[in-house]
């Protein structure tokens, strides 16, 4: 089975390279978004990995429940305390956020948001409820559009030690929250332009597989419609047309089967057989 990359910047390829010999393993994906499109964890789920997907956007959460029934899928947000906060939701993008500053920046670019109240939980409390101290915690992925510091402050890195932490972060500035991770005894391994990868001090052997970008030797393929494929093909209309054609074919087959099993068809076949018999004489 070829390794299919779904993630937008080959994050799944990098994680698979570093962790493939330790699984099937466990992950937590904060800001999971869609279960397939641009998903960091889809390819690992296909290989038996299981984890916790955290996604407060309702329709994305429902899609996760539908497509990832063996994962734990939570429709909450993550912060530094148990609370209810205003959530700025952009339903058709991955830009939803609890950060007012980030929402205002995106709105200035023409991206509309819907405001609603969501429940927030700390990552530590989620781990206490759903994770297992006896099982390795292979990686934590965080993509929360400007709310990273609050997520990290709500985690107990003494009790819960993901081997790798992957956080979306702008390439052109050092993040304010980085000191939290470094003080928790993690080491920066890679900045790929849109993400930063950190390795736990007790797992520094994972620095080596993260030291080079994805390449031919990783033997991966892009999923259909990936933005790096050429040409970029929107396969959704093709899928809709294919589904419609298959439905028409199924209907036609059902009609044909009904005709073949009807009494009229049997009589017609008998008459045809008799005519051939008479003609043969």
Image (cartoon, rainbow, N blue to C red):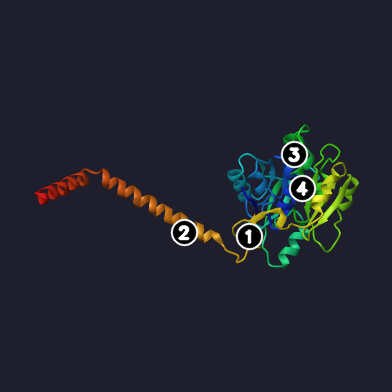
Question: What's the distance in space between the residues labelled 1 and 4, CA to CA?
Answer: 23 Å
Mark before the other along the chain sequence, 2 or 4: 4
Q: Upstream in the sequence, badge 3 or badge 1?
A: 3
Q: Which badge, 3 or 4, is on the more N-terminal residue?
A: 4
| Separation (CA) of disc 2 from disc 4 | 39 Å
> Which residue occupies the foreground of this view, 126 or 267?
267
- Residue 97: image location, x then y, percent: 73, 55
User: Which residue is denoted by mark 4 in the rendering?
Assistant: 18
The reply to whether dot 2 and dot 1 touch (C-beta < 8 Å) is: no
Q: Circle 1 is placed at which residue position?
A: 226
In the rendered structure, which disc, 3 or 2, sits on the residue that comes first in sequence? Answer: 3
Question: From what the image shows, is residue 211 above or below residue 133?
Answer: below
Q: Position of residue 224 (x, y in %)?
A: 59, 58
Residue that mark 3 sits on: 126
From the image, tell me which residue sits under label 2: 241
Mark 3 vs mark 1: in front:
1
């Amino acid at each position: 089975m070829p390794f299919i990359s779904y993630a937008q910047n080959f994050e799944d390829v990098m994680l698979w390279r570093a962790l493939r010999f330790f699984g099937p393993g466990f992950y937590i994906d904060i800001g999971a978004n869609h279960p397939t499109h641009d998903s960091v964890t889809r390819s690992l789920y296909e290989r038996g990995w299981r984890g916790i997907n955290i996604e407060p956007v309702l329709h994305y959460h429902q899609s996760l429940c539908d497509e990832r029934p063996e994962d734990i899928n939570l429709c909450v947000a993550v912060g530094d305390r148990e609370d209810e906060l205003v959530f700025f939701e952009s339903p058709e993008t991955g830009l939803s956020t609890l950060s007012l500053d980030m929402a205002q920046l995106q709105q200035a670019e023409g991206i509309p948001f819907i405001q609603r109240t969501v429940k927030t939980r700390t990552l530590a409390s989620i781990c206490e409820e759903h994770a297992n101290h006896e099982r390795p915690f292979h990686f934590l992925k965080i993509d929360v559009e400007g709310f990273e510091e609050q997520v990290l402050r709500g985690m107990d890195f003494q009790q819960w030690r993901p081997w790798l932490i992957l956080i979306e972060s702008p390439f052109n500035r050092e993040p304010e929250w980085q000191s939290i991770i470094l003080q928790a005894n993690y080491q920066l391994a890679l900045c790929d332009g849109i993400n930063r990868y950190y390795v736990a001090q007790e797992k520094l052997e994972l620095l080596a597989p993260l030291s080079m970008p994805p390449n031919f030797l990783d033997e991966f393929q892009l999923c259909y419609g990936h933005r790096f494929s050429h040409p970029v093909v929107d396969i959704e209309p093709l899928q809709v047309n294919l589904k419609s054609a298959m439905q028409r074919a199924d209907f036609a087959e059902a009609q044909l089967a009904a005709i073949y099993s009807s009494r009229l068809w049997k009589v017609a076949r008998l008459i045809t057989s008799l005519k051939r018999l008479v003609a043969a004489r």
